[in-house]
Image (cartoon, helix red, strand yellow):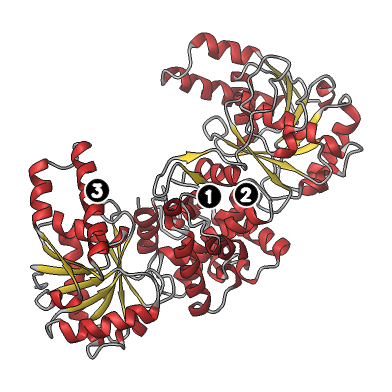
Amino acid sequence: MAREFTSVGVVGLGTMGAGIVEVFARNGVDVVAVEISDGALERGRATLTGSTDRAVAKGKLAAADRDALLARVDWQVGLDALHAVDLVIEAVPEHLDLKQRIFAELDRVCKPEAILATNTSSLSVTEISVATTRPNQVIGIHFFNPAPVMKLVEIVRTVVTSPEVVADVEGLCERLGKVDVTISDRAGFIANALLFGYLNHAVSMFESRYATREDIDAAMKLGCGLPMGPLALMDLIGLDTAYEILDTMYRRGGRDRRHAPVPLIKQMVTAGLLGRKSGRGFYTYERPGSPVVVPDEQTPVDTEPALADGHAESGTGSARSELANPAAVTKIGVVGSGTMATGIIEVFAKARYEVVSVTRGAEKSAKVFEAVKTSLNKGVVRGKLSETDRDAALSRITWSATLEHLADVDLVVEAVVEELSVKKALFASLDEICKPGVVLATTTSSLPVIDVAMATQRPADVVGLHFFNPAPIMPLVEVVRTIRTSAETTATAKAVCAALGKTGVVCGDRSGFVVNALLFPYLNDAVRMLEASYSTADDIDHAMKLGCGYPMGPFELLDVVGLDVALAIQRELYLELREPGFAPAPLLEHLVTAGYLGRKTGRGFRDHTRR
């Protein structure tokens, strides 16, 4: 039987500490809330009152329940008030010496059987525990922000934590309605170990001006379905907090360069640009603590004009494309017969463009026609498209098996197999066939666009247009400019994306572009974590879904994407960037060699044949 906790103490009443107080008080547990001064205590009380008042206003908490919740909290200055509680959770800033001093004092104050817990997100629970005479009763209980909302709790046991203490805390988390994952004491635990490498990489992209802050954030939200972009998330976490976590993970986690804080983070912290709490970080906010972003000197300006054919343009371009006018585009050529080509044809046809579909023969053209027609019919059945609009879209498509029919188009989108030799040969042919000024676009997701561009005599007209699958649904397109792409070509590509109702994010010609370059190293890190037997695939997936709000866990996503695809992309990233941490995880390579490729073969990280 797990022990019954009738009273708990919470030390430190910042955003996280006040949230933890609310979690316990909501679930009928008496809480002693402790701060270092009367002023800090009042700020904590105001945080809790504001949170519960908002819950009442939204109808998520009855006024009577709010009053009962607040009545369960005993507000006190000083640790001596914790002498009778069953459990103490410390939630002070991430400084090891501070936590050790607090735990030494808690060891003196608290009753012998009390469990002492730290909410640290990155520091060593073991190092904190040795400041006490009861390290076997010290454990990590890592809540996620906002604690009342987020379901995940990481329970961190040290090598000396008593199994009974672990079981008691697991039972408590269940009582609180939380989902717990129990893990050993390692830098970053699960969620932060996977999250902060990704965040740091995103900051390095911004620091090097590879893409704008808006485009990086839009890419990850729209391309991966994440609840927030990485730079907006850094602002929410606090750049000072992020710096401390990254620095700790770098020092404790084998000095992996990917966890060494990007210099820009330290510079911003020194300048007081801490994110939302200071009113300015990567973005500028209405006031300190506000989530409302306001324009600043980096905000994109609406300067790109509409296309000549009347299609609208959103004007969220980079500074480079703002200086050029987009060319008029009314007729599109699409080369290819796979799933991506089929989706792109549908997207352009529905957006009222004339489309010339070119495949390698009449049989393939017939298959693409049937696929497009089937997809449009589904739209009609679901009420998203009228029969008239479906028929009009089909009427705009010309079916061909010869590239010569692209002689009068304004834009060609290539969506053939991901082999550089095939793409270069195709672009060489397009160079001879297409009229001057035509934008030639490749949908490659991993190959260098410049290699394709240099197969032509017009590299200034070549750009990457990386659609995401399924193209009719996914709202993101990565617009990839090479060092030879003209400003007008970039502006035209952006304008066409907007006319399709897509968000076009502009980035340089680097392996993985934005989305894959940020996504796949994170997936690779998850495989390494599993490979090291640190946690299970299920717990890692739970941690990222419940702790970070991701729509899928890394192993769910890998099985959907295909382990062979993931391995190929990771190899490309490693070969280009030569970052040791990007080397494909051996477990990923072994599974691919064994033919365990994910859902498409029935087995990947999980067995899908039994479901």
Q: CA distance from mark 3 to mark 1?
A: 39 Å
Q: Position of residue 598 (x, y in %)?
A: 49, 54
Using the rendered view, name the quadrant where residue 489 is placed.
top right
Sequence-wise, the earlier of marks 3 and 2 is 3
Q: What amino acid type is highlighted by mark number 3?
A: Ser
Q: CA distance from mark 3 to mark 2?
A: 36 Å
Task: Tell me if residue 359 can be seen.
Answer: no
Q: Residues within 10 Å of mark 2 (few under 14, many from 20)?
A: many
Q: Which residue is mark 1?
A: 561
Crowding at mark 1 (Cα within 10 Å: few <14, some 14-19, many 20+): some
Nearest to N terminus: mark 2 or mark 1: 2
Left or right: where does residue 66 sit relative to residue 565? left
Q: Which residue is mark 3?
A: 51
Nearer to me, 349 or 399: 349
* Residue designated by label 2: 514
Viewer-nearest of labels 3 and 1?
3
Of tags 2 and 1, which is closer to the observer? 2
When the figure is inspected, residue 602 is found, relative to residue 104, above or below; the finding is: above
Of all residues, the one furthest to the bottom in this rendering is 133
Secondary structure beneath label 3: helix
Whichever of callouts 3 and 1 sits on the residue coming sooner in the sequence is 3
Return the x and y of residue 170 as percentages of the image width and height.
21, 68
Q: Quadrant of residue 81?
A: bottom left
- Decide: is 120 above or below 26: below
Residue closer to the observer: 146 or 467: 146
Confirm or deny contact between disc 3 and disc 2 (CB under 8 A).
Answer: no
